[in-house]
Amino acid sequence: MILELLLTLSVVINVIMVLYTRWILKNYKEIVTAMDDLGEMIAQYVVHLKSVYELEMFYGDETLSSLLKHGRDIVEKLEDIELLGEEEEKEEENEATEATEKDTSE
């Protein structure tokens, strides 16, 4: 009787944890997608700024030069964050898969 109750409780907790993990991964994926979109927008901004900087009338302008450098720095930082996010996402997906396999084997 107690063993059946503990087994049932364990299965319920595992199912809840799997659903929670899937929910967290879904939200995380949305955040990563938004970060990717933001990175692309900033990269396009840097390209546009570079094209303006290369115009004769603005060539050599220190303000545009510093804006260009700042934009590149932001793009690099976002790429670093993106790489870190992809590694964590793969680890979390592996954990969720293992948890699902464990539930199905019980």
Image (cartoon, helix red, strand yellow):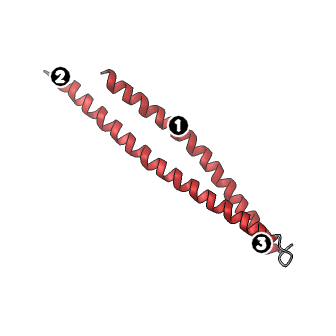
In terms of sequence position, does the residue under pointer 3 or pointer 2 come before the other?
A: 2
Q: Which percent across, then down, holds residue 21?
A: 39, 40
In the rendered view, tell whether residue 98 sits above or below residue 70. above
* Tag 2: amino acid: Glu
The kind of secondary structure element at disc 2 is: helix
C-alpha gap between disc 3 and disc 1: 40 Å
Q: Which residue is mark 1?
A: 90
* Tag 3: amino acid: Val
Residue that appears at 49% across and 53% down: 31
In terms of sequence position, does the residue under pointer 1 or pointer 2 come before the other?
A: 2
Q: Which residue is mark 3?
A: 52
Residue that appears at 57% across and 42% down: 86
* Tag 1: amino acid: Lys
Q: Which residue is mark 2?
A: 4
Residue that appears at 57% across and 57% down: 37
Q: Which percent across, then down, holds residue 30?
A: 47, 51
